[in-house]
Each structure stands twice: as C-alpha cells, then as structure tokens.
Image (cartoon, rainbow, N blue to C red):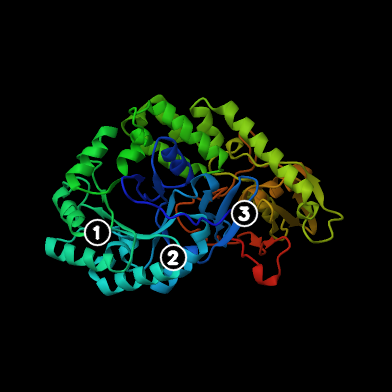
C-alpha cells in the first residue's frame, strides 16, 4: 500500500466509533458505504500488536497484521486507507510509538483509548485508568505526536468534576494532538445514564482543536437527522456514533435507515469477501438483530457454525460459493506465478499416503472429530500416539499437516485455512486409508471417551489459549512456515 501523506480532517465529520469485536474491516467498509467520513478500528492492545508481522495478503488485496499464532489481529485495505483510524490500548509511551510506526503507512490516523471503563482495559493501566494519571497521558501523546507523521487523537471520558475535566483536556491539547473525542459519561456511568451534553459543550468552547462528541446513541441518536441535533447540543466539531451504528450502520445515510435485511446481507458479503472469521461475523449480526434473535432467521443464525451456514441462513449460499471459487482461483493464479511457494513440506515425501480431502465440521457430531477417532484406534491397537507435523505456506498462509501413525505418513493434498483444520484432514486420510470409521454423522463407530470438543478454528475475539493436555494427548511437533529459518518456528498449540 502507498504511504498516506494526507492529513485527516476532524471538522464536521460523521465517525464510526471504536467498538470491540464490532469495528473489524467488514463493518468499517459498510459504514463508509453508508456515509461515514472516518472509521475507527476496535481497540487493539499494544503488546498484542508488537507481536504481529505485517503481511501483504495478495489473495484478499489486504494488509494483515498477523500474530505468532497466525491469527489476524488487524486487517485493512486500500479503500479505507485515508479514512481508518487505528485505536490502540496502551499505558506506555515507547510501546505506543512502536505500534504507531508499525501501522502508520496503512492507516489515516492514530488514536489512544483513554475512556474504556472495562476491567480488561483498566487493569493494565490502559483506557479510563489513564484519566487518573495526566503525566502519563501527556508523555504518551507527546511521544506519538513527535514520533509519527500521522495525526494523533485520543478518546476520553469526562471526570466527575467539570473543573478537573477542563484542566485535563487543556493539558491534552498542549501535547499537539489533532482532535479529542469525548464520551459524555464518567468512568462509573453506563449507557442507561444520561449523556452530559453540557460538559462536552464546555470542552468544545474551551479548546481550539476539534472536539468529537460521543455517547448519544441511547438518548439522542435514533436516525440520521438526530446526529446533527446531537452535534449542536454539544457544540462539537464532529459526532462519533457507536451503538446506533452497530445496530444499523445505515444510520450514516442522509436518506434514512435502510431495511435491516438489506444491511445485514451487505455486511455478510463484505465478511465473506474479506475472509472475516465466522464467529466475529455472527456476533455483529446478532447485535443488529437484537429483539429479532428469536425469529426463524435469528435461530438459523444462532445455529450457524461457519461462514457458509451464515450465508445460507440469509439466502446468500450461491454468493458464498461464487466468492470462494473466485478466491480459490486467485490463490491458484498466485501460486502458479510463484511455484516455489506451492512446494510440499521440506522433506522426503516418498511413501506418504495422500488423498484430496477436506474436513467439514458439519458432517460430524458436536463431540466427535477424526483426530479423536484416530487416537482411540491407536490406543486400542496399542500403537504410539499420532504425531502431527504442520507447515504453513507463506504466500496465502494456508496449512498442510502430515500425521505419522505406526511409522506411516498420511497427508491431504488440499491446503487448509488453519492448523487445526489441516490436522483433522490428515487424520481423515489415515482413517480412510485404513478403512476405519472417522466419526461422521450416521456412521457406526466404537464409543469414544467424552472429551472437550476440539474447535476446528479459533475465535478471533481473544488470544489463543492452549488447552490443558488430556492424559495421553496427541503428540504434536512445532509447525514451520515454509521458507522460514529456525528462528521463525511457531509452536503448535
């Protein structure tokens, strides 16, 4: 992506607020479609971002910031490059600057969260915890303003005292930031408490930089015209909308709200096109449905366990299949242009039994997976436990796993989107080649000990946590990124 040298203007703007689990790429693009001028990503923690590697995803035409466990922490694209503000959670100036420099060429602005009252933020000295430490606020913001070429902002909550609030924001303004977003509630207040428009107005009348009013969704903003009324009530330069936009992003549309069904379908299309994890897609759709969650469509959404099932619940099954074909074709074209990336794992592959197989979670009962069936079979036959070796292909970050059972190796020729899926697929190859049951629905198979279901993929809402090993758990070797050196080994989980 080209370095963005434009300066973001915060005057008279409609802004999508940063919202955890909501402000991912599909929602940001949808908000832009409906008229938002600026979109904030969800708060991302500095320590988490500093573990990430910047990766150009040629298949999706995105820039991804990828954690060591291969989870995409932040994904952006050229369309939003001059509109997206990266919000970080931080309590340290040097870490904040390191994150800003990591992402600054791919975003329009940098923001520091100083208003989140949730424990997961405040317990690390971040979010609203910073409001009680003006010296640290000043150091973080001054360091960012001096150290990055992108406009720097912060988002705060008001303090119990108006005098203390005004003293704080004046000190913040002196750091040289470009704008300040103000949520008109204090740290202890929640959405059911009225937003303090008068305090936001006092701040706007005190400062010379743009003030962005936030917190009006519950009492003030029900439709597009209400946004301007809220701006006037607070005398702010711009308005930042959170929950009203989460419920229906077309709140930014001057012509009025669009039907929810239309909005949700458009959101789903972006989610599929940009490979959004289905659990995140499902969460956002549930926020839109709200009281309709018990409707037939809501029940279908609740039962969905994949992006494909979500699409089918909203009449977009054909769109899903077509989009996946297009992405697969793009991936194949890229691989054809870089044949070295399509190589098999770096080892002697002679003697490996291979099949073209994919693992479909829907074909198996909730408590059964092929890996569990293979492990049980090995135990009954008194064979060593299966050993999985997984590699990752750099060009598209797809995975391939080889399982060794009784000194014989088994592998699928098809690559998967996650390490766990690749291991399940390798287990299926072994079971089928031996004529053994793999646990599919309707298949007769020996009873299995009840174990915690293995999630085929991980929810992107938090860091991956290694599950405690069961007695005799499957042995796993580290998985390796193809073409990487020894220092880039990533431990399998």
Query: Badge 1 is on which residue?
Result: 208
Q: What residue lies at 33% left-to-right and 28% top-to-bottom?
A: 256
Toward the viewer: 256 or 119? 256
Within-10-Å neighbours for mark 2: few <14, some 14–19, many 20+: many
Give the crowd class for mark 1: few <14, some 14-19, many >=20 residues within 10 Å: few
Pinpoint residue 418: horizontal percent, then vertical percent.
62, 50
Q: CA distance from mark 2 to mark 1?
A: 29 Å
Q: Disc 3 or disc 2, which is closer to the eye?
A: 3
Check the image and report above or below for 193 versus 159: above
In the rendering, at what x and y percent does residue 120 appear? 34, 61
Going from the N terminus, do you reach mark 2 or mark 1 first?
Answer: 2
Which of 480 and 412 lies nearest the eye of the viewer? 480
Which quadrant: the C terminus? bottom right
Where residue 180 appears, as percent x and y from the top left, is: 29, 57
Report which residue position mark 3 lands on: 56
| Label 3 crowd (10 A; few <14 / some 14-19 / many >=20) | some
Q: Of discs 2 and 1, which sits in the foreground? A: 1
Residue at the spot x=24%, y=35% of the render?
226
Question: Which of the two discs, 3 and 1, labels the residue nearer the N terminus?
Answer: 3
Q: Is residue 260 visible?
A: yes
- Identify the residue position indicated by label 2 in the image: 46
């Amino acid at each position: 992506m080209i370095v963005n040298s434009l300066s973001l203007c915060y005057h008279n703007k409609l802004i999508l607020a940063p919202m955890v689990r909501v402000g991912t790429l599909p929602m940001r693009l949808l908000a832009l479609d409906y008229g938002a001028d600026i979109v904030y990503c969800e708060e991302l923690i500095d320590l988490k971002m500093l573990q990430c590697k910047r990766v150009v995803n040629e298949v999706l035409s995105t820039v991804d910031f990828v954690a060591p466990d291969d989870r995409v922490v932040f994904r952006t694209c050229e369309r939003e490059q001059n509109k997206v503000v990266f919000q970080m959670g931080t309590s340290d100036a040097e870490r904040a600057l390191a994150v800003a420099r990591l992402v600054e060429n791919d975003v329009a602005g940098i923001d520091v969260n100083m208003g989140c009252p949730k424990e997961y933020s405040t317990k690390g000295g971040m979010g609203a915890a910073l409001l009680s430490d003006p010296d640290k606020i000043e150091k973080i913001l001054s360091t960012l303003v001096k150290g990055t070429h992108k406009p720097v902002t912060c988002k705060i909550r008001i303090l119990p005292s108006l005098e203390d609030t005004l003293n704080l924001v004046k000190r913040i303004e002196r750091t040289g930031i470009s704008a300040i977003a103000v949520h008109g509630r204090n740290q202890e207040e929640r959405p059911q408490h009225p937003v303090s428009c008068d305090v936001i107005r006092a701040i706007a009348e005190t400062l010379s930089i743009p003030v962005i009013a936030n917190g009006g969704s519950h009492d003030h903003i029900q439709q597009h015209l209400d946004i301007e009324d809220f701006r006037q009530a607070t005398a702010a330069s711009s308005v930042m909308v959170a929950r009203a936009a989460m419920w229906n992003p077309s709140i930014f549309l001057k012509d009025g709200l669009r039907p929810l069904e239309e909005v949700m379908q458009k959101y789903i299309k972006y989610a599929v096109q940009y490979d959004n994890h289905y659990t995140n897609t499902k969460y956002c759709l549930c926020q839109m449905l709200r009281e309709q969650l018990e409707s037939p469509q809501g029940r279908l959404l609740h039962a969905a366990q994949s992006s494909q099932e979500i699409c089918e619940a909203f009449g977009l099954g054909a769109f899903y299949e077509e989009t996946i074909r297009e992405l697969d074709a793009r991936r194949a074209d890229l691989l054809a242009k870089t044949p070295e990336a399509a190589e098999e794992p770096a080892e002697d592959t002679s003697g490996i039994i291979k099949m073209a197989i994919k693992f479909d979670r829907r074909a198996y009962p909730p408590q059964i997976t092929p890996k569990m069936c293979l492990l049980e079979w090995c135990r009954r036959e008194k064979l060593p436990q299966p050993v999985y070796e997984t590699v990752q292909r750099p060009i598209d970050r797809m995975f391939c796993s080889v399982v060794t059972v009784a000194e014989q190796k088994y592998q699928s020729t098809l690559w998967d989107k996650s390490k766990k899926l690749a291991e399940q697929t390798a287990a299926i190859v072994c079971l089928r080649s031996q004529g053994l049951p793999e646990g599919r629905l309707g298949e007769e198979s020996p009873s299995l000990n009840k174990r915690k279901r293995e999630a085929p993929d991980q929810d992107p809402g938090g860091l991956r946590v290694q599950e405690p090993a069961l007695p005799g758990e499957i042995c796993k070797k580290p998985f390796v990124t193809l073409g990487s050196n020894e220092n880039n080994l990533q431990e399998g989980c």
